[in-house]
């Protein structure tokens, strides 16, 4: 229902824009203004292309001119050499762009941050020189006198403007479908926290390859159409830096990771730059570049995510209520010590860790650690700072590969699997520092985790709502994650892990930074999860809380297993007191 509402609302906006655009096209006094309107649609589509990859996934591309230029040359060369009409050439240009995206993405996604951006910059530069070396310095589209319409050649510029809007409409519809699907939600999760996305079961490489192929297809199509408008194609025109820069800037100016950001950016910047170029181009050559340069500086200073996000944040100001008091005002009772649960340690072994080891240079972070986790139990991992607890979690969860040892879960060795694959097999995880997807609502944050175990979007939504209710956040589903308190973020992250319907949960210091009332509340939630049959492995420094949660302790010191057993016995162990609990604990005991 939510997705359908979002799509219908977007189609309504598109229809309104269409009425305004068509009206302006027919009111335009001459071909110059009609061409300007055509270019607004062209660069809006190019911005949507850039946004599909970089806006949603956060992988900044300086090389979208590669797809745009390949699309332009595909249309031109098909007509020059084989007489193929642009009506066929433009869809083929989209296929070329998609294939180029796949070929570029496979090696480039091994890189991160500015290395990826610089690698993307290299592709259009290389193609520019290749096409010049091949002798395609200036290729003109042949004029067809007998049947020009069959070759997309019109004497009325308004027809091109209308065709451009048709392409814009198709690109917007693709963008809306992406934004409202698990495809777009997965990309947004990758953008905002790739590690958390992997832990939630998202196959990050696969989704990024989908994104760059779709992005390349859109850029190829609009590049092919742009060639039809220009009639003459040169490598600097379609592969040049300004091509990539304009796609990036109109999107950043309007709003990244939104469907309408590129449309808004193009609607403002293209007419402004074209008008100034017409009026001042003879006095200030390159005035268009100045316009885009000033636009990007203003955006960085005043609205780093674009105008749309700035307006949304302004509209939301004051609407976000501080519910921290409502969540914790009712004094949550101390849950007291954990009742004896002898049955919790007698079930079949769900997780078996055998001789697990990991070193970083000369530092042995984890040394031959072995222990079992019975199904239905709560096992606490304790130890001093630097004992190797989080490293152990990362080894169990696939974020790091062990030097040796085995991790057997439900009869299957997990070593070598990616975190997304481990999540898909039934292990959820929270992090030592909460990793919310800050621009998403609570519901959409949790929905990211639900997709891995749900065959349909409806089932995923049901799982997400069940998880939200279990942690006590029902009624707050529409709140944005960036406005949540620390307690709420941890509850939301716990719900995201639960939404995957895991057999086992890894909780990494989930009580860190919480007050006593919040700790009590979280203990109640964790006990409820355990009572529902979920096996829990938890790292925590708050010993009083751990005594109320764990059926058994596993103690690490300097990466090695120091002790293991019932909490009441472990806390009396002289070696554990010496290494971790300290003299005060012994005196108090």
Image (tube, rainbow, N blue to C red):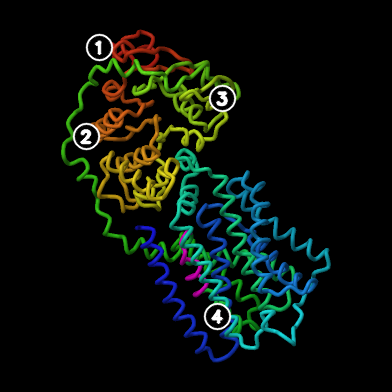
Q: Nearer the viewer, residue 449 or 83?
A: 83
How many neighbours does mark 1 have within 10 angstroms: few (below 14), some (14-19), or many (20 or more)?
few
Residue 306: x and y in percent read: 46, 63
Q: Earlier in the sequence, mark 2 or mark 3?
A: 3
Name the residue tied to disc 2: 517
Single out the mark in the foreground, 1 or 4: 4
The reply to whether the magenta stretch includes residue 267 is yes
Residue 433: x and y in percent read: 40, 37
- Under circle 1, the secondary element is loop
* Residue interval drawn in magenta: 257-268
Q: Residue at x 24, y 45 (%)?
A: 324
Name the residue tied to disc 3: 402
Name the residue tied to disc 4: 162
Q: Residue at x 56, y 24 (%)?
A: 402
Name the residue tied to disc 1: 589
The reply to whether the magenta stretch includes residue 206 is no
Single out the mark in the foreground, 1 or 3: 3
Residue 249: x and y in percent read: 55, 65
**Residue 452, quarter of picture:** top left
- Under circle 4, the secondary element is helix
Q: Nearer the viewer, residue 519 or 141?
A: 141
Q: Residue at x 59, y 55 (%)?
A: 212
Single out the mark in the foreground, 2 or 4: 4
- Under circle 2, the secondary element is helix
Q: Earlier in the sequence, mark 1 or mark 3?
A: 3
Q: Can you tell which mark lies on residue 380? A: none
Q: Earlier in the sequence, mark 3 or mark 4?
A: 4
């Amino acid at each position: 229902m939510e997705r359908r509402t979002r799509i219908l609302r977007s189609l309504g906006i598109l229809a309104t824009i269409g009425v305004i655009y068509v009206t302006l096209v027919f009111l335009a006094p001459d071909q110059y203004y009609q061409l300007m309107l055509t270019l607004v649609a062209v660069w809006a589509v190019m911005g949507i292309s850039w946004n599909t990859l970089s806006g949603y996934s956060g992988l900044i591309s300086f090389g979208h001119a590669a797809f745009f230029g390949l699309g332009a040359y595909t249309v031109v060369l098909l007509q020059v050499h084989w007489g193929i009409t642009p009506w066929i050439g433009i869809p083929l240009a989209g296929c070329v762009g998609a294939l180029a995206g796949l070929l570029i993405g496979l090696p480039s996604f091994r890189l991160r941050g500015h290395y990826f951006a610089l690698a993307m910059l290299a592709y259009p530069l290389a193609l520019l020189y290749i096409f010049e070396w091949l002798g395609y310095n200036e290729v003109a589209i042949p004029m067809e006198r007998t049947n020009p319409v069959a070759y997309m050649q019109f004497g009325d510029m308004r027809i091109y403007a209308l065709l451009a809007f048709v392409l814009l409409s198709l690109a917007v519809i693709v963008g809306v479908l992406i934004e409202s699907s698990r495809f777009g939600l997965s990309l947004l999760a990758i953008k905002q926290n790739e590690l958390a996305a992997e832990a939630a079961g998202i196959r990050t490489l696969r989704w990024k390859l989908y994104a760059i192929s779709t992005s390349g297809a859109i850029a190829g199509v609009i590049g092919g159409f742009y060639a039809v408008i220009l009639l003459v194609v040169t490598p600097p025109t379609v592969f040049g830096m300004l091509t990539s820069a304009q796609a990036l800037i109109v999107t950043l100016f309007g709003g990244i990771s939104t469907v309408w950001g590129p449309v808004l950016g193009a609607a403002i910047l293209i007419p402004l730059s074209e008008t100034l170029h017409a009026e001042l181009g003879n006095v200030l050559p390159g005035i268009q570049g100045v316009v885009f340069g000033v636009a990007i500086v203003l955006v960085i200073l005043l609205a780093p995510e674009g105008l749309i996000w700035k307006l949304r944040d302004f509209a939301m100001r004051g609407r976000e209520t501080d519910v921290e008091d409502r969540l914790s005002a009712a004094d949550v009772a101390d849950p007291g010590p954990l009742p004896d649960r002898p049955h919790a340690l007698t079930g079949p072994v769900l997780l078996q860790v055998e001789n697990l080891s990991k070193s970083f240079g000369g530092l042995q972070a984890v040394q031959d650690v072995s222990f079992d986790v019975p199904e239905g139990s709560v096992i606490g991992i304790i130890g001093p700072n630097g004992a190797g607890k989080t490293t152990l979690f990362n080894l169990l969860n696939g974020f790091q590969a062990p030097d040796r040892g085995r991790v057997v879960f439900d009869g299957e060795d997990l070593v070598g699997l990616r975190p997304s694959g481990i999540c898909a097999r039934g292990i959820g995880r929270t992090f030592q520092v909460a990793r919310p997807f800050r621009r998403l609502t609570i519901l959409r944050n949790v929905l990211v985790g639900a997709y891995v175990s749900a065959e349909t979007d409806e089932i995923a939504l049901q799982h997400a709502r069940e998880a939200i209710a279990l942690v006590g956040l029902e009624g707050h589903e529409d709140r944005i994650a960036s406005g949540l308190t620390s307690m709420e973020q941890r509850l939301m992250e716990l719900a995201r892990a639960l939404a995957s319907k895991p057999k086992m949960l890894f909780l990494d210091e989930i009580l860190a930074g919480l007050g006593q009332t919040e700790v009590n509340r979280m203990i109640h939630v964790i006990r409820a999860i355990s009572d529902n049959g979920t096996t829990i492995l938890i790292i925590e420094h708050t010993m009083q809380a751990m005594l109320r949660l764990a059926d058994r302790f596993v103690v690490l010191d300097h990466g090695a297993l120091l002790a293991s057993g019932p909490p009441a016995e472990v806390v009396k162990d002289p070696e554990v007191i010496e290494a971790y609990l300290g003299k005060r604990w012994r005196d108090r005991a």
